[in-house]
Image (tube, rainbow, N blue to C red):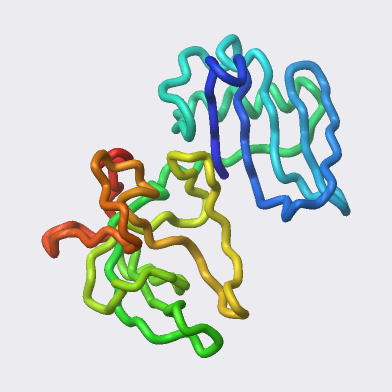
Amino acid sequence: MIFSYNKEHVGDVLLIIVADDQAKENYVERKGNVAKVTVDKGEVVAWNIFKASTILGEIKGTGQVELTEEQINRLNKELAVNGFIETLAADTKPKIVVGFVKSCKKHPDSDHLSITKTEVDNGEILQIVCGAPNIKAGQKVVVAKPGAMMPDGMMIWPGKLRGEESWGMICSARELNIPDAPQKKGILELSFDAVVGEAFPIGG
């Protein structure tokens, strides 16, 4: 679940992205300050909360933001008073983290993709397909897990690349908006003392 807020460019609206709509037609049901966005069969993919600061108080940050437990409770009350039965659950785990590439092999149906098994936290291992030429086993890297929003607004969801499942993205310095990032293609390699699972600060 991604919470996004940009008062200057969007207005006082909290965008809550629940799932990838996969470019399907969206249906919107609005009640009061709450709009529920669904796709076929009623699957909820997003919520828009209007006049968000009057409901939540101060919202810190721009782009992907983190909400407190109290703010999540206020959102759920707002949904309920407007007649929605769904509830939102807080997910406080960081989504852009230090990872460790445990294994790396060539994709069987591509001459430039690799399939990695990458540890992202305390034994949690994700299969991630990566197209960087410098990817290899034994590296400490930056991983955008499903549910992450990149600095350019791109959202990360599970998917498939050439038939192989990929549960995130191993990031380059440019994708992380790091100042003076090298222009050549390749993932950002971290020093080996970086701690797996720790949040990686956007902008370096």
User: Residue 105: x and y, percent?
Assistant: 38, 86
State whether residue 61 is above or below residue 93: above
Q: How many labels does the image show?
A: 0
Residue drawn at the location 19% of the way across and 57% of the way down: 195
Residue drawn at the location 52% of the way across and 70% of the way down: 166
As drawn, the residue found furthest toward the top would be 54
State whether residue 1 is above or below residue 188: above
Q: Dividing the image into 4 quarters, which one contains the N terminus? A: top right
**Side of 158 where 39 appears, left or right:** right
**Side of 80 where 195 appears, left or right:** left
| Quarter of image, res 77 | top right
Q: Dividing the image into 4 quarters, which one contains the C terminus? A: top left
User: Residue 201: x and y, percent?
Assistant: 29, 41
Residue drawn at the location 31% of the way across and 53% of the way down: 183
**Side of 65 where 34 appears, left or right:** right
User: Residue 16: x and y, percent?
Assistant: 62, 35
**Side of 27 where 74 appears, left or right:** left
Q: Nearer the viewer, residue 95 or 178?
A: 178
